[in-house]
Amino acid sequence: MNLIRVMPAEGSMLFDYSFRDYDEVRKFLDTAEWNRIHTSMALTMIASFFVWGLLLVTAPLVTEWPIVPSWGYMYVLLSSPAGLLIGNVVLGRTSDLLGRKSLFMATLALGIAGILGIIFSRNFFEILASIFIAEFGFGGEETVSLAFLAEQFPLKYRGKVLVLVSNSANVGVAAISGIFIAFGYSIAIEKLIFGVMAIGGITIALYTRSRIPESLRWFYTKNSDTLIEKPQMHVIPFIVLSMFAITIVLTFALVADILGPYEYPKYTSIIPFIYGLGEAISGFAIIAFIDRIGRRLTSVIAYMGGFLSMAVFLLYLISSLPFFVFLVLLVINSFFGELGWAVREILQPELFTTIRRGSGIAAVRGIAYALYIVSIFVLNGISVFEYMVFATIIWVIGSIGSILWYSKGYETLNKSLI
């Protein structure tokens, strides 16, 4: 018998429990009723994902500021995924070694430093470095947060919570884009409101983060000397997750972040606002049915729907219809984009084992963001039509992945994490 005792963490409201084996830990977590600990865990992640949403589109939005020269657009747009990529890889692996909760304060500190840098930046190079640092903290933290949430929440809430939390990033995207639309005449006001929203989210995150426990699954697997890891991750799940990540990262970034500064400079704020708002509304709707349909079928609906709706964009461009039609198509595509994002966010932690969950999610996301960085260079200067052809091809990749997972994968809905 390998008896491990979990003592209360200061301020975390975690009771003193003893567990005989890992199956007992899993049962305890999977069947728990919602309590104050779950509320604190959900709130701290919702707050930090909201702030990350503010940062997701900060790079394209600040290209409207005079301190960012036109020749520097590419570098600003690169600073965001570069910070996220490196933070994702570093923090994902570190969380497997040192724990989930132990990193949360460090990531907040990095994020705060970056946000302050953005607000008080006086030149191009300062804002470049600030975006990188902020994304390293908040963007890199997403990997750790997904692992933590999936490991801690009961089965009946796991999918809903992962969608709710990740959807708060879309709310952040829409919120900051709306501010840039409403107050585009004043950089000072834009910075002020950006700072207020960021500080509000960070304050909530700081307070609730001090009251959450370490991941119990991680704690047990790290401290057990008899636990034998059950093999679960194989080649097909990793390939499918990578295909999903490539599709969502590249298409969201290209449509919401890149098209504005390069092709529709007058609509740089409007495009991410519409796309973010559409995804935010879709995200709240998806919560209602995400645990009623199997993950495999949901992935097919999401990625096939995304491919078909993106293909319609090509007809729009050929027909030279008004920009309003472009926005309508953007909203339609955003629903499937959000559904694809949701099922990817759920499957990532569900398909990796606890002992390497952070590293696994980081690897999948790392591949996608590395390709996104390459795509910024490769696609620089091409036409809108060529952008959409590229995006449609990327959706084909996700569609193939969904069919592969539907035919060769296994269902994870209501299945306990190992």
Image: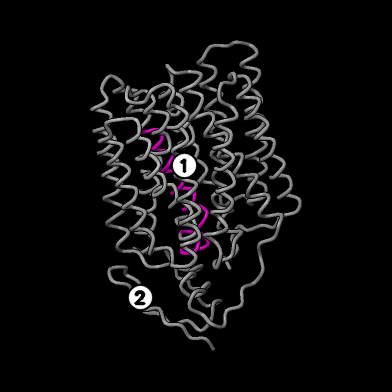
Residue 4 percent coordinates (x, y): 46, 83
Disc 1 is placed on an element classified as helix
In the image, residue 102 above or below residue 223: above
**Residue closest to the far right:** 407
Where does the magenta region start and end?
Answer: 149-175
Dot 2 crowding, Cα within 10 Å, few <14, some 14–19, many 20+: few
Quadrant position of residue 183: top left
Q: CA distance from mark 1 to mark 2?
A: 32 Å
Q: Which mark is residue 284?
A: 1
Q: Residue 406: horizontal and vertical position, in percent?
A: 72, 49
Q: Residue furthest bottom?
A: 1
Res 43 visible? no
Q: Amino acid at mark 1?
A: Phe
Q: Secondary structure at mark 2?
A: loop
Pointer 2 residue: 15
Dividing the picture into quarters, in which one does residue 176 lie? top left
Please identify the quadrant where the C terminus is shown.
Answer: bottom right
Give me the residue at 54% from left, 66% from top: 354
Q: Residues within 10 Å of mark 1 (few under 14, many from 20)?
A: some
- Number of numbered markers: 2
- Seen at 62% across and 44% down, the residue is 244
Query: Percent from the top left, x then y, of residue 73?
Result: 44, 26
- Which is nearer the eye, 378 or 402? 378
Asked whether, in this view, residue 177 is left or right of residue 161, the answer is left
Left or right, 313 with respect to 16, comes to right
**Rendered location of residue 161, percent (x, y):** 46, 53
